[in-house]
Image (cartoon, helix red, strand yellow):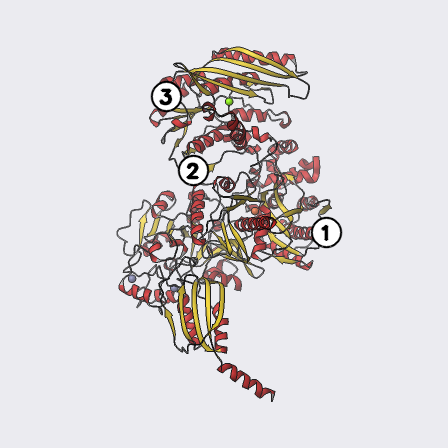
């Protein structure tokens, strides 16, 4: 009986007809969204229509209730690669009896409320055509469709319309126009749509910008020939120029390094395919997915099989940065002869990536031997993104191409705020409603180019977010460029947010946390509320404010910023803290003894506080330990010693060293016993690999132990992890594990990196929360 | 930036000093002469143009290789007058002495003042002495003021700088700052560095005589060459580009800076002048300097660019470039 009733009911249900009106908002225009809805609706045998409206895309679907439900649950799951939903709402409307589904072309196309999509790697469908000798776009380097190709990097203004992109100067040929106007076509309103007869063209020039006349017809073949000979090629890509050399050619890589003054920073490698990738790095399931994702970031994978790649590509670091081709041009370059290319953003040392043909010829003079150019202008700079896999999840190191400017959804609505970001690895952020718009990676604010890029990014993001906040957020550090800029800009309110509070609030916002948490900000340095350089901070924080509940016992940093380049200085300081006046004898037996002639002077500097600011930086502790173990005394870039130390710590930890915790008003972590243990083991000849592993474990225990003490005082069980030190995956994994074992709910960043790339979001949200509190208090 | 108390950095010659001047003194003392914020006030009396300046000296140690607080106090005021195009005429000297200060030291310092003034051809024509109780001052402070006469036809000021101007410095930078650092008793450094403390009226006089196309001059004292160039770039709106490889720096100074973590660009000089002049006269002026005892290591270090608000740009020895910001006068690491 029961059985029959159920069947009767379901038969009745399936006969029930509904008509539902759906509103999709987010990145839904110019990304093949309407053809997608058309396909889905047809699959589920639904009638109705889909069209663009100013707020996004609206669809009405009519059919049986189960089909409608299946449609509604399927739509968000299989979105086109470039699309992103920020909201989906649906309401039942009265039936019209429609059984056919159609795409309605509307004149409200590309309205301002619609978001700009990031740039997307060339899709499978386009690649198929690209490889088909019968296709009219066979081997065409600028093939794209609504599922793929450039977006952000070609916009001059919003809304996203061909006339407002750098494609404006390429009138569509009749065939391309037909595709562009046909709602059922994959290229319907694909703004960068083009073909060999109407679209951008490629050419190759020598070092002076003069085209190679004889090889004009096949610039690719000539480019490959030059690369195979070890030449340095500047390649105009999606978000800027790359400098490319054959990654298997040690001589070429060295030449690139010496010309680019980038002596040891690891260089990213673009490999032909997965096979080539697996030869040079450990590619797990997750890494593979990330490598093949439409965003195509550089993925940091543990190194392996050194012989296929030139040793100086990434010396002394545990990982290799690998990416797959993401533009048709890349596929052409890596087609047959070459299997791996070093692809590093084209600029001098720490400047932003360069984008214009003329700019490249000027700025890369003396670096590039030849230029592979084209005439589709890059209008917005966008560096390659960098990501890694940890704890089974994607973990960002640099969020830029493929991700920006897709807004980060917040769980609640905020007042409008503009956050200018920190000094290094800067991004800026506009908060509007429940969305946070982060700019592409801008970089270090020390160069005039970066400052100009910051201004450009500010204007761009204001246009993309359609918002000009008059509340401004910046760092507490008075010497940061962004802080000085905040003082100059004509805004109503400037709120200064402490660096590590911004770190924690950023991770909180990504996880939708609003109440009190224990924030572990493990960092290089940031300006503290007491004017000293903080960096190993346990903050009892909410969005508005924080208390410094615990921190590392401060130690002097002799030479200030100089100590960042010379890890032996931090080592000397920690030895002095750990051994008192006997430190020099101890240090004289350690690998930093080369610097012994300066020990006396550094001791006096620290004793008299001459250019030796006190700091609680954890980053510098990593530097110090690397120096104590003889791994590095001097570095070429920030974090190099810490990365080398991480690379050494690959063996499982065997023991835990000791550390002290002092409980006063604040909880102070004292790592002097750990330093003494490391010194003892180093002196007794234990392998540095083992010491490095045990150092990581001990540090993780220590951080977890301090967190547990704070929980005893406060009862708070949420631990939020941020700060540049958490780029170290061993540290991140073990701290997260220790905290989970202690019963904490542990929160990490999701879409943003733990380094200073996350600061702008934290500044913005903290400032917004303060504004709200002020309003509420009124 | 709000501070409710004076910090040491307010006297450091950096951004905070600047804020003190523009935030407190300038609005209260406001007048056309002061507003220019140049090293000296320029006053017109009939058909005569005079310049007038004052400076106080509170250094530690009082004696250092190459000079002492006395010679420094004379040179400082002479140089402030000279960079405004003034020929120094006369000076005043005020002393604030701490109870118990050794008479012998005072004699020695006064003798060195007299010698410095004589060598520069300037008379000390008036003075003042105050003694304060032990602890109320640190040994000895000196204030000097000076008056000079300006005969150079065109005005020397930031406002006269033009795009394309050459930037010349009269010698090695950071010598005085490095000397004072190296003589800080507690560091126990042994070095051969001497302060560059010197009167520049002769050197500057010979330049002004040779070229009618000098536009602006500054003596890069406290805050160093970096601070004055950054300040001029900010005031004028012009981009100023300098080449790191062209900066004259003594090996010993470089060594001390490297170990202590300082930048010679921001160390004090007491006998150097930075000159902005039309590029056509750069060689001539360089030549004049190199033939003068206080300008032997003079160098052309850069040029004035467009008026684009980019500030002071340093092209580094490794091929990059960075913006040199006005130092804050405090040293908290910026690296994260
Ligand atoms: Fe940070
Ligand atoms: Mg003065
Ligand atoms: Zn495609
Ligand atoms: Zn076409």
Earlier in the chain: of badge 2 and badge 3, it is 3
Judge the density around disc 2: few (<14), some (14-19), many (≥20) Cα neighbours within 10 Å: many
CA gap, disc 1 to disc 3?
72 Å
Query: Which quarter of the figure has residue A199?
Result: bottom left
Q: Is mark 1 within 8 Å of ligand 1?
A: no
CA gap, disc 1 to disc 2?
50 Å
Measured from the top left, where is residue A759 in percent x and y?
Answer: 54, 49
- Residue A713: assigned label: 1
- Residue B154: assigned label: 3
Measured from the top left, where is residue A489 in percent x and y?
Answer: 47, 41
Label 1: state its secondary structure: helix
Measured from the top left, where is residue A670 in percent x and y?
Answer: 69, 45
Q: Is residue A399 left or right of residue A377?
A: right
Subunit of mark 1? A
Badge 2 and badge 3 both on one subunit: yes
**Front disc: 2 or 3:** 3
Q: Nearer the viewer, residue B173 or A253?
A: B173
Using the image, determine if residue A606 lies above or below residue A244. above
Judge the density around disc 3: few (<14), some (14-19), many (≥20) Cα neighbours within 10 Å: few
Label 2: state its secondary structure: loop
Subunit of mark 2? B
Q: Is residue A667 visible?
A: yes
Residue behind mark 2: B310
Q: Nearer the viewer, residue B292 or A591?
A: B292
Q: Is residue B31 left or right of residue A679?
A: left
Label 3: state its secondary structure: loop
């Amino acid at each position: 009986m029961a059985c029959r009733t159920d069947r009767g009911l379901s038969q009745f249900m399936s006969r029930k007809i509904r008509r539902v009106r759906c509103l999709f908002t987010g990145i839904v225009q110019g990304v093949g969204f309407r053809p997608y809805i058309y396909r889905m609706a047809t699959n589920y045998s639904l009638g109705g229509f889909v069209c663009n409206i100013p707020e996004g895309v609206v669809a009405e679907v009519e059919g049986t209730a189960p089909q409608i439900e299946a449609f509604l649950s399927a739509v968000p799951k299989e979105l086109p690669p470039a699309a992103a939903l920020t909201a989906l709402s649906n309401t039942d409307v009265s039936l019209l009896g429609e059984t056919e589904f159609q795409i309605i072309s509307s004149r409200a196309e590309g309205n301002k409320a619609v978001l700009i999509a990031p740039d997307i790697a060339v899709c499978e469908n386009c690649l198929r055509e690209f490889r088909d000798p019968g296709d009219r776009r066979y081997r065409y380097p600028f093939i794209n469709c609504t599922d793929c190709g450039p977006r952000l990097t070609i916009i001059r203004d919003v809304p996203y319309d061909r006339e407002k992109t750098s494609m404006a100067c390429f009138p569509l040929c009749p065939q391309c126009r037909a595709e562009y106007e046909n709602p059922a076509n994959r290229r319907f309103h694909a703004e960068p749509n083009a073909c060999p007869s109407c679209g951008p063209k490629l050419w190759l020039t020598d070092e002076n910008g003069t085209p190679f006349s004889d090889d004009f017809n096949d610039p690719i073949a000539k480019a490959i020939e030059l690369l195979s000979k070890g030449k340095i090629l500047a390649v105009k890509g999606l978000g800027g120029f790359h400098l490319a050399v054959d990654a298997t050619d040690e001589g070429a890589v060295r030449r690139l390094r010496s010309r680019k003054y980038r002596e040891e920073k690891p260089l990213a490698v673009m490999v032909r395919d997965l096979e080539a990738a697996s030869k040079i790095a450990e590619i797990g399931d997750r890494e593979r997915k990330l490598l093949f994702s439409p965003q195509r970031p550089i993925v940091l994978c543990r190194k392996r099989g050194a012989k296929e790649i030139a040793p100086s590509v990434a010396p002394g670091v545990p990982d290799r940065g690998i990416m797959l081709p993401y533009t048709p041009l890349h596929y052409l370059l890596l087609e047959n002869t070459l299997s791996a290319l070093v692809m590093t953003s084209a600029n001098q040392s720490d400047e932003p990536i360069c984008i214009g043909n003329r700019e490249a010829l000027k700025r890369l003079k003396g670096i590039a031997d030849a230029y592979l150019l084209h005439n589709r202008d890059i209008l917005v700079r966008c560096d390659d993104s960098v990501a890694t896999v940890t704890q089974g999840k994607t973990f960002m190191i640099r969020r830029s191409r493929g991700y920006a400017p897709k807004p980060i959804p917040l769980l609640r609505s905020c007042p409008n705020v503009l956050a200018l970001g920190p000094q290094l690895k800067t991004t800026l952020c506009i908060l509007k409603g429940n969305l946070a718009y982060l700019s592409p990676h801008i970089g270090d604010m020390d160069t005039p180019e970066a400052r100009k890029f910051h201004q450009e990014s500010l204007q761009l993001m204001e246009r993309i977010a359609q918002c000009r906040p008059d509340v401004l957020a910046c760092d507490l550090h008075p010497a940061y460029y962004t802080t000085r800029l905040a003082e100059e800009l004509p805004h109503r309110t400037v709120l200064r947010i402490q660096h590590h509070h911004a770190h924690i609030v950023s991770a909180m916002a990504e996880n939708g946390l609003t109440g009190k948490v224990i924030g572990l900000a493990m960092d290089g340095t940031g300006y503290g509320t007491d004017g000293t350089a903080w960096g190993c901070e346990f903050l009892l924080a909410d969005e508005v404010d924080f208390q410094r509940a615990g921190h590392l016992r401060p130690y002097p940093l002799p030479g200030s910023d100089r100590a960042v380049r010379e890890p032996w200085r931090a080592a000397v300081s920690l030895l002095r803290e750990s051994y008192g006046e006997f430190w020099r004898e101890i240090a004289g037996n350690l690998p930093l003894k080369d610097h012994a002639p300066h020990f006396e002077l550094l001791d006096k500097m620290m004793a008299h506080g001459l250019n030796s600011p006190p700091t609680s930086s954890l980053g510098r502790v990593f530097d110090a330990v690397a120096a104590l173990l003889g791994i590095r005394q001097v570095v070429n870039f920030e974090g190099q010693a810490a990365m080398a130390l991480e690379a050494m710590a690959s063996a499982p930890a065997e023991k835990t060293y000791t550390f002290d915790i002092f409980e006063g008003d604040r909880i102070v972590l004292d790592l002097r016993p750990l330093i003494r243990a490391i010194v003892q083991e180093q002196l007794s000849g234990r392998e540095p690999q083992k010491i490095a592993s045990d150092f990581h474990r001990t540090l993780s225990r220590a951080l977890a132990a301090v967190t547990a003490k704070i929980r005893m005082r406060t009862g708070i069980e949420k631990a939020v992890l941020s700060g540049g030190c958490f780029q170290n995956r061993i540290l991140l994994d073990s701290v997260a594990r220790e905290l989970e074992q202690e019963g904490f709910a542990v929160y990490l960043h999701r879409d943003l990196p733990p380094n200073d790339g996350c600061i702008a979001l934290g500044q913005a949200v903290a400032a917004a929360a303060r504004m709200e509190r002020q309003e509420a208090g009124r | 930036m709000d501070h409710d108390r004076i910090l040491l950095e307010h006297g450091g010659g950096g951004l905070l000093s600047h804020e003190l001047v523009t935030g407190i003194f300038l609005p209260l003392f406001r007048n056309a002469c002061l507003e220019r914020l140049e090293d000296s006030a320029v006053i017109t009396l009939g058909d005569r143009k005079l310049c007038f300046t004052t400076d106080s000296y509170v250094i530690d140690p009082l004696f250092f290789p190459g000079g002492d607080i006395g010679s420094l106090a004379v040179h400082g005021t002479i140089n402030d007058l000279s960079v405004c195009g003034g020929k120094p005429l006369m000076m005043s000297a005020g002393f604030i002495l701490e109870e118990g200060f050794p008479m012998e030291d005072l004699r020695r310092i006064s003798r060195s003042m007299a010698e410095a003034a004589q060598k520069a051809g300037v008379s000390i024509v008036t003075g003042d002495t105050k003694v304060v109780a032990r602890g109320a001052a640190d040994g000895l402070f000196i204030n000097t003021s000076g008056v000079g006469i300006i005969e150079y036809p065109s005005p020397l000021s930031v406002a006269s700088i033009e795009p394309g101007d050459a930037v010349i410095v009269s010698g090695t930078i950071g010598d005085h700052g490095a000397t004072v650092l190296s003589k800080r008793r507690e560091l126990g450094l042994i070095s051969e560095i001497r302060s560059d403390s010197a009167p520049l009226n002769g050197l500057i006089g010979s330049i002004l005589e040779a070229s009618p196309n000098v536009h602006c001059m500054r003596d890069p004292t406290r805050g160093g060459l970096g601070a004055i160039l950054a300040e001029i770039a900010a005031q004028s709106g012009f981009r100023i580009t300098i080449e790191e490889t062209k900066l004259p720096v003594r090996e010993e100074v470089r060594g001390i800076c490297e170990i202590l973590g300082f930048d010679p660009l921001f160390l004090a000089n007491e006998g150097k002048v930075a000159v902005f002049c039309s590029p056509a006269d750069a060689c001539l002026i360089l030549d004049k300097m190199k033939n003068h005892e206080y300008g032997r290591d003079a160098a052309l270090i850069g040029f004035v660019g467009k008026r684009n608000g980019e500030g002071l740009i340093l092209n580094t020895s490794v091929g990059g470039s960075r913006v040199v910001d006005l130092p804050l006068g405090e040293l908290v690491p910026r690296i994260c």
